[in-house]
């Protein structure tokens, strides 16, 4: 399973890239609003900061409701950073979103269909030509449904029918989510940088480092 970082914060994106684990970046209107920056400018900065990843998702705005509106926005987004091949257009899971997906996929543009909460939604998105489908597991857990189980079911369905859309486990809140979606067959987990830091940590690792430091005797010269 690959890691994407789920943030529009440039510092966090650069840190994740620097430690060598980053395969992509996802943003959404809420994450960009948190940064208080202009949307297209931030997407361009991200694309320039992480040139070796496979995907940087830029979501159409909440004003785009019809397929025509989403396509018009997408046509502008794909020009960012000189038509960067890494840009992925993120659309919501609606009928208009599916129509947009089909249109963009035919043009060779990668699409991430977001806000997926059922297996059927994932199947429709994959059939429309999505490169990525994003089930939101944390938000399902929030309403007492099993988010990881949804990821496992989508993974099984995609294997059964040889669908090549990649599953991005999204709305990941903690390290246990990461372990479980990896084992459930997600291709990618998109996680806040804070969770990447948590994944790297263990109290016994810290204690071990402290003990080695305390025991270390400088070799005699
Ligand atoms: O990738 C989707 C994510 O941004 C949503 O996460 O924590 O707002 O449910 P959350």
Image (spheres, rainbow, N blue to C red):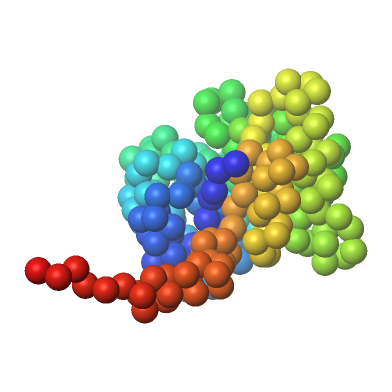
* x and y percentages locating residue 35 in the rendered image: 48, 71
Asked whether 91 or 190 is in front, the reply is 190
* x and y percentages locating residue 212 in the rendered image: 39, 71
Quadrant showing the C terminus = bottom left
- Judge whether 182 appears above or below 35 on screen: above
Horizontal relation, residue 181 to residue 78: left or right: right
Residue 94 quadrant: top right
Asked whether 16 or 79 is in front, the reply is 16
Residue 79 quadrant: top left
Residue 219 quadrant: bottom left
Kindly tell me whether residue 87 is visible in this rendering: no
Q: How many marks?
A: 0
* x and y percentages locating residue 130 in the rendered image: 65, 33
* x and y percentages locating residue 12 in the rendered image: 44, 65
Asked whether 125 or 69 is in front, the reply is 125
Horizontal relation, residue 143 to residue 210: left or right: right
Tell me what residue is drawn at x 61 percent, y 33 percent.
131
Outermost front residue: 220
- Judge whether 35 appears above or below 125 on screen: below
């Amino acid at each position: 399973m690959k890691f994407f970082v789920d943030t529009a914060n440039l510092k966090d994106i650069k840190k994740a890239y620097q430690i060598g684990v980053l395969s992509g970046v996802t943003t959404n209107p809420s994450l960009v609003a948190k940064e208080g920056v202009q949307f297209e400018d931030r997407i361009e900065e991200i694309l320039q900061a992480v040139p070796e990843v496979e995907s940087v998702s830029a979501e159409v705005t909440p004003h785009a409701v019809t397929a025509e509106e989403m396509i018009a926005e997408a046509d502008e987004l794909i020009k960012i950073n000189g038509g960067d091949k890494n840009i992925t257009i993120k659309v919501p899971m609606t009928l208009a979103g599916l129509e947009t997906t089909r249109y963009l996929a035919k043009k060779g543009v990668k699409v991430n269909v977001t806000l997926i909460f059922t297996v059927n939604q994932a199947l429709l998105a994959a059939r429309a030509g999505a490169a990525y489908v994003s089930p939101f597991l944390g938000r399902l857990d929030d309403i007492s449904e099993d988010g990881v189980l949804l990821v496992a079911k989508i993974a099984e369905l995609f294997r059964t029918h040889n669908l090549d859309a990649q599953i991005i486990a999204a709305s990941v809140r903690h390290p246990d989510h990461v372990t479980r979606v990896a084992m459930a067959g997600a291709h990618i987990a998109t996680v806040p940088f804070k969770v990447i830091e948590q994944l790297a940590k263990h109290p016994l690792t810290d204690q071990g480092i402290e003990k080695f430091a305390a025991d270390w005797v400088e070799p005699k010269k």
